[in-house]
Image: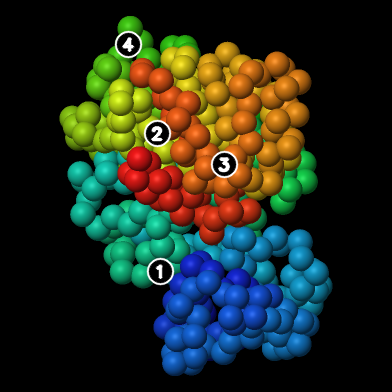
């Protein structure tokens, strides 16, 4: 076992950190779990149980003493690889890796990995359902569900792993190599962590860094940043496009999803079979089909999965219809580009709830579309003031500040007229008011239910 008898420091006592600490301990490592927060501020109930498994806890401290005789430092996604303690570790020659790297080193099965700014969860979930039609030994995880290191524990060498990966998770990979990888799109995001768009793109590119000629990378031809990555890869490039017919790849022709690969032209199904709203979801389906085809999924199984797939929780999720007003939960829209895609999925007459923890991304295009499509804009959270200024700069009308989340939902209900849509699509992270976007979405649905 690669971690047997190794002394390992795990940083971050969240879901990922706790999971990987347990996995490493089961694989014979001597594990210390550290978090800058003291024990009473660590959110998970599982932290206090770890000592029973022989895992040492170092909560409320992250000093250099923790690095004594350490072989590896494993970093949770929420912790930047640039923090001082990790800089010291690297200077001492200690290998700093991500939880995803641990999963890779323990995983006997091929990995199908998906990243991108938007659409990762929908594409990963849809692909997972497609892969299950050909192989029951399938794991779906990574940036969704449980930590990938825990998910791969029971998979066999004959199985397949479908992984959603964020730029944070890719930051700390060393040898990680998916057999099939995909980058869906690139727009500015997480610049508070990566500082520049160039750094952010470089993190996404790490998904194919270790790929060889027998591997595949699926790229969005319509995104010029991704199209230009073709010259950087050693693996075989499979493009997808929702806008044009391709010489090779997957695209839409006469309303039909069509694969053109290895001198074959294969019709899949009409785009009308897609149950998900919005142009962006056509792109997600194309990407999932591309990976599934390369993995060996039969076309008729792809089609059936597409027809049955109704989306994922918190992503343009239909919640309720009240007095002919439809309420949608798009809490997973944590950046303006994602919210733009949600707005594009509907006609006009939207009441939009937006705001939260500001990522300081450009709001111009988002607010211009808001002006065009939104009847009432209700603002929440720390980003309220900057969002208002950006909205007023392009002359958005009917802007409201909500005192809290409950007030935002009740105000939307009060303003809503028949045939309108109430859309929670924050374009922001959730951490100013909630533990996660999932909690934000669940509370929204609960508040709507109370209406």
| Figure check: 165 above or below 248 | below
Q: CA distance from mark 3 to mark 2?
A: 15 Å
- For label 1, the SS is helix
Q: Are marks 3 and 1 in contact (CB under 8 Å)?
A: no
Q: Earlier in the sequence, mark 2 or mark 1?
A: 1
Residue 58 at x, y = what percent?
64, 85
Residue 103 at x, y = what percent?
47, 65
Q: Earlier in the sequence, mark 4 or mark 3?
A: 4
- For label 4, the SS is loop
- For label 3, the SS is loop
Mark 2 or 1, closer to the camera = 2
Mark 3 or 2, closer to the camera = 2
Residue named by callout 2: 328
Residue 315 at x, y = what percent?
42, 38
Q: Which of the 4 image quadrants contains residue 208?
A: top right
Q: Nearer the viewer, residue 285 or 210?
A: 285
Q: Earlier in the sequence, mark 4 or mark 2?
A: 4
| Figure check: 204 above or below 378 | below
Residue named by callout 3: 334
Residue named by callout 4: 255
Residue named by callout 1: 150
Q: Nearer the viewer, residue 127 or 216?
A: 127
Residue under the point 66% across and 75% down: 37
Residue under the point 40% across and 69% down: 150
Q: Earlier in the sequence, mark 3 or mark 1?
A: 1
| Figure check: 172 above or below 328 | below
């Amino acid at each position: 076992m690669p971690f047997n008898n190794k002394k390992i420091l795990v940083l971050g006592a969240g879901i990922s950190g706790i999971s990987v600490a347990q996995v490493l301990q089961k694989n014979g490592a001597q594990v210390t779990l550290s978090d800058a927060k003291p024990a009473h501020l660590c959110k998970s109930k599982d932290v206090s149980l770890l000592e029973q498994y022989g895992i040492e806890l170092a909560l409320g401290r992250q000093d250099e003493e923790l690095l004594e005789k350490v072989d590896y430092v494993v970093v949770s996604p929420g912790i930047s690889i640039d923090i001082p303690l990790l800089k010291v570790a690297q200077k001492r020659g200690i290998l700093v890796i991500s939880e995803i790297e641990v999963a890779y080193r323990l995983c006997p099965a091929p990995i199908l990995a998906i990243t991108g700014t938007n659409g990762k969860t929908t594409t990963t979930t849809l692909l997972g359902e497609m892969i299950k039609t050909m192989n029951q030994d399938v794991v779906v995880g990574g940036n969704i569900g449980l930590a990938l290191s825990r998910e791969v524990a029971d998979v066999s060498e004959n199985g397949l792993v479908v992984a959603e990966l964020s730029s944070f998770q890719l930051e700390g990979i060393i040898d990680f190599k998916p057999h099939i990888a995909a980058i869906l799109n690139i727009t500015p995001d997480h610049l508070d962590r990566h500082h520049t768009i160039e750094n952010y793109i470089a993190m996404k590119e790490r998904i194919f860094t270790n790929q060889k000629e027998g591997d595949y990378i699926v790229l969005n031809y319509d995104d010029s940043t991704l199209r230009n990555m073709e010259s950087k890869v050693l693996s075989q490039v499979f493009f997808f496009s929702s806008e044009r017919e391709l010489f090779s790849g997957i695209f839409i022709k006469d309303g039909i999803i069509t694969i053109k690969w290895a001198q074959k032209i294969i019709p899949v199904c009409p785009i009308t079979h897609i149950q998900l709203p919005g142009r962006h979801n056509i792109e997600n389906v194309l990407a999932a089909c591309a990976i599934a085809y390369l993995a060996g999924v039969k076309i008729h199984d792809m089609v059936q999965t597409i027809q049955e797939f109704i989306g994922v929780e918190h992503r343009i999720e239909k919640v309720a219809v009240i007095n002919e007003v439809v309420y949608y939960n798009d809490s997973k829209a944590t950046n303006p580009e994602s919210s733009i895609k949600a707005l594009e999925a509907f006609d006009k007459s939207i009441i939009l709830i937006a705001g939260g923890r500001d990522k300081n991304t450009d709001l111009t295009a988002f607010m211009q579309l808001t002006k065009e499509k939104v009847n009432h804009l209700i603002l929440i959270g720390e980003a309220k003031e900057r969002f208002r200024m950006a909205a007023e700069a392009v002359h958005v009308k009917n802007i409201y500040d909500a005192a809290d989340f409950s007030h935002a939902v009740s105000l939307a209900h009060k303003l809503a007229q028949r045939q309108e849509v109430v859309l929670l699509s924050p374009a922001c992270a959730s951490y100013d008011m909630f533990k996660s976007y999932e909690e934000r979405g669940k509370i929204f649905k609960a508040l709507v239910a109370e209406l």
